[in-house]
Amino acid sequence: MNSPAALAAESAGVRPTRTPAFEQRLARRYRAERNFRLMGLSAVVLSVAVLVFLLGNMFINGLAGFQRAEMPVTINFAEAGVEGDAISLTAPSALQTLEMGGLPDVVAFYAEDQLGETAAAQLSPDAWRDVAAALMADPALITGTRTFQLAASSDLASGLGGEGPPEMQALAKQLASEGKLAKNWDWGFMSRSDATSPQAVGIWGALKGSILTMIITLVLAFPVGVLSALYLEEYAPKNRWTDVIEVSINNLAAVPSIIFGLLGLAVFLTVFPNMRSAPLIGGMTLALMTMPVIVISGRNAIKAVPPSIRDGALAVGASPVQVVFHHVLPLALPGMLTGTIIGMARALGETAPLLMIGMRAFVATPPEGFTSPATVLPVQIFLWSDEINRGFVERTSAAIIVLLAFLLLMNGLAIYLRNKFEKNW
Amino acid sequence: MTVIHPNMDDASAKIRARDVCVFYGDKQAIDHVSIDISPDYVTAFIGPSGCGKSTFLRCFNRMNDTIGTARVTGRIELEGENILSDAMDVVQLRARVGMVFQKPNPFPKSIYENIAYGPKIHGLADKKPDLDIIVERSLMRAGLWDEVKDRLEDSGTALSGGQQQRLCIARAIAVDPEVILMDEPASALDPIATAKIEELIDELSGRYAIVIVTHSMQQAARVSQRTAFFHLGKMVEYGPTSEIFTNPIEERTKDYITGRYG
């Protein structure tokens, strides 16, 4: 207010807020605010656009991944003389029995008969397995007739998509026009496991592996994380040791995930040498990674519980344990759950540490339990994206959609639980 | 030195404090305070902000234990038992000496649960009918029953500020304590809610020994029969409320009462 103009205005009896200079400054302030809002809005628009592009691209590619080129083949089992009964077809060795009994040849015979020689040659080499699966699911079929949609070879499939060698494209076009080749919705994708041909792969093995691994992670990391957070906040004395522990936990949360994989490799696989690739080891490794996140978010949630609630409970004579379990924990639980889900979501998408403990193996059957070899969704995506065969591109996108859907489901559950437990004070 | 008025005909003391000092780290908050609290009267602690009256009050149910740096020396007897000794069970002490805080702090649970919580954890009532009786009686005594009897399952935090504070008083009396400590119970409330709380204190006195900290001298004059004036961590003067307000002995008390400082 020392400028000559201001002084002159003041001496003339004009208030400092009524001068033209003030109005100019006011306009400048409004302009600054407008610009800032515009910048923020464009940032939001940009990130939404990128997200929409990414998801849209993934979705369009992925939808094709949920389909596969199939050829209809009708098989009369009674006429073909495939041997088997209710007992042998439900035995664990049924697949081998059927293979030895010549089921692949029977399938090939009927295919040649109905589709022609060139087309039958382009049947996926694993096609008979679908027939075997149907027989094992329904042994009564052995005396009947059924039409199967059998997978075409990956060459023919890419021919149908307008790619690959010209003669294959021509064959695909011809078969399609005769109604002998079509892209069908592939329900089996959700129930099969990894395979060498993109026509025969499925996501169930990796999905089940992910679910089993997540269960182990949750069961180990949640109680340990919550109890650590409670102890550190409610009971631990505030001294140098607890400071060291706090710094260590914060640092642990920032350690690159591959280091945890090395730890799992060096420690867990030394203790359990026969469990390479097992969800148990994967879950333990990811639990190490998730626990610090749960501890940190849990401590923040406990800190946010108003001290007045604690005082109120203490004043009616609640013991410290009762204060914690009747009042602090219920109020802190929503925040703890949020942190847990964030940690779990990170663990679900983690690839590097699991590569270290051998979960990148080719596993063609879904894991039977926590100790059988398995792979997980992100590793499966990584493996498929590395395949040369064109058909795997779409399958990779489909796997990504499954992973994102799983993630969305977990986050939805977290939001539901948080709203359910959230209380006002 | 503390001035104790001679004409206090208190036959017995519920709480007898002797040479109580409280330290927060190196800082001394209470300096050798000795006082007898009568079971029959409402005792008010008055004094300017930061004089230590709340700190002293929190010694009576050992709420200072929750502050890591706080240290209490001296002797406080509740019916002859030293509550500052390690042998004293804090949980039991707090069941015998209830407390109401400055800011209403109902639990984020139903009104019913707020009252039933104390009796439940102390095992005073196991069956629902017994609890129902305790809840009704406590709310009745706190003058809240008629307002909430139809919505006992509503959250305690949904009540108005004055109702919340009466709920907290009901919560304190649900375990039938011998003493109720009130730390500026009406300072966050409007005048009408304040009047209700003061009325309630009046009704509860006699059944419970009540100690109230207040920075409103009018409130002390209205609700209490005994008043102690605190200044800079020392108890300056203690006597019948009427005498403290009309005929204080100490110059500092007189200055504070007349609004010279504070």
Image: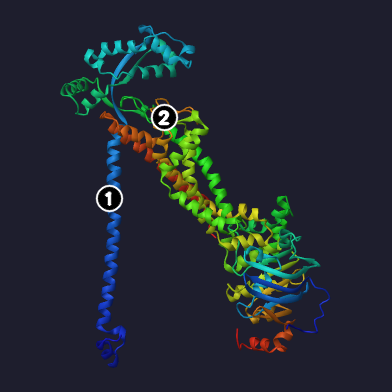
Please tell me whether residue B85 is drawn above or below residue A395 in the rendered image.
below
Q: Position of residue A200 (x, y in %)?
A: 33, 24
> Label 1 neighbourhood size at 10 Å, few (<14), some (14-19), many (20+)?
few
| Residue type, numbered disc 1 | Ala
Q: Say which residue label 1 marks.
A: A49
Alpha carbons under labels 2 and 1: distance apart:
33 Å
**Chain ID for label 2?**
A
**Chain ID for label 1?**
A
| Viewer can see residue A111 | yes
Q: Nearer the viewer, residue A333 or A292?
A: A292
Q: Position of residue A2 (x, y in %)?
A: 29, 87
Q: Secondary structure at mark 1?
A: helix
The residue depicted at 29 percent of the width and 57 percent of the height is: A43
Q: Quadrant of the C terminus of chain A?
A: bottom right
Please tell me whether residue A109 is drawn above or below residue A354 in the rendered image.
above
| Residue type, numbered disc 2 | Gly
The total of numbered circles placed on residues is 2
Horizontal side of residue A388 vs A255, given as left or right? left
Q: Nearer the viewer, residue B259 or B87?
A: B87
Q: Which mark is residue A205?
A: 2
Q: Position of residue B64 (x, y in %)?
A: 66, 66
Please tell me whether residue A188 is drawn above or below residue B100 in the rendered image.
above
Q: Position of residue B10 (x, y in %)?
A: 81, 77
Q: Quadrant of the N terminus of chain A?
A: bottom left
